[in-house]
Image (cartoon, grey):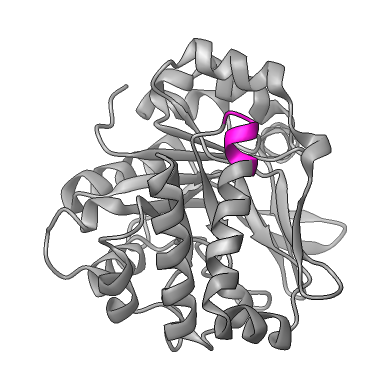
Amino acid sequence: KNFAGLTLVYVTPWNNHGYDVAKWFAAKFTHVSPVWLQMKRKHGGGFSIEGEHDIDQGWVRDVKTAGPQTKLVPRLLFEGWSVSDYQNLFTKSMKAVEMGNYIAHFLEQHKFDGMVLEIWSQLQGRFKSELTKLVRTLAEVLHSKSLEIILVIPAKFKGSMFSESEFSALAPHVDGFSLMTYDYSRTGSPGPNSPIDWVEDCVVSLAPELTEHRSKILLGLNFYGYDFTPSNMEAVLGHSYVELLSQYKPKIKWNKQCAEHHFQYKSGGTTHELYYPTLMSIKKRVELAEELGTGISIWEIGQGLDYFYDLL
């Protein structure tokens, strides 16, 4: 392991190469998060965790064998909740404790070390104080059972769904923040996925001082790219990237300002512009994380090229 900070990596069932990568390089990862679980609302005000059918205990054992220190923290995504469902949860304090106990029991039952919680972006910046209270309650319950909680947080775009005040309120209570510093460019304006100055700004705006709390921020790295046409953008994974390189043999250019590689190619009369991570762009972001004193999080390890992990 070359990178000293926390290193969280996501694994998805739809890119199953990530299952192999997690086993091969487990010792480089402090946390592995399989994207398996959804928190669903039940009629009558209850809730249940779905996705149990995706849990592969044999694979969990293999990862633990390859990296005895590596923690397995599946992602739990709040899915299909209406605003009134959330309000119901926020207004009944015992409901949050009940939910915490239910989650903790589920994690213990499956011998997980904690969870990655994805709930913040669903509310688009509303109910921040209620969410803060809920996350603190869940963290308290999980910590009482020696389980970890990492919170997924949105990056800073126009307006801020998650700012320094929320970070300060939660940093003493959670074990990490998975910061989604990618998907910067949009359809119709081809450009970098994660301009490096913006990545730095996202971290510093949450934690202006280099403190132990800043070390809980896991700066997000994308291991996928985007292929832009004038009217569309499509995600590009490692194998497609390699195929495009061999088919079109484009001239790859380095954009110094955003610290990313990109190239153009023509197909069927349409000009494409493609941004995809490279050893150089990843190295620059790992160095930035070291300089800022943060960890890193990677979305996701079924999408990249296997030699990327030499840097971690």
| Residue 194 in which image quadrant | bottom left
Residue 229 can be seen in this image: yes
User: Which is nearer the eye, 287 or 243?
Assistant: 287
In which quadrant is the N terminus drawn? top left
User: Which is nearer the eye, 107 or 189?
Assistant: 107
Residue 263 can be seen in this image: no
Image location (x, y in percent) of residue 23:
57, 17
Image location (x, y in percent) of residue 246:
70, 31
| Residue at the image position 42 percent from the left and 35 percent from the top | 279
Q: Which residues are magenta?
A: 106-111
| Residue 213 in which image quadrant | bottom left
| Residue at the image position 83 percent from the left and 75 percent from the top | 44
State whether residue 312 is above or below residue 90.
Answer: above
| Residue at the image position 67 percent from the left and 33 percent from the top | 242
Image location (x, y in percent) of residue 185:
56, 71
Image location (x, y in percent) of residue 106:
65, 42
Q: Is residue 40 left or right of residue 188?
A: right
Q: Residue furthest top?
A: 65
State whether residue 253 is above or below residue 157.
Answer: above
Is residue 169 in the magenta section?
Answer: no
| Residue at the image position 58 percent from the left and 28 percent from the top | 111
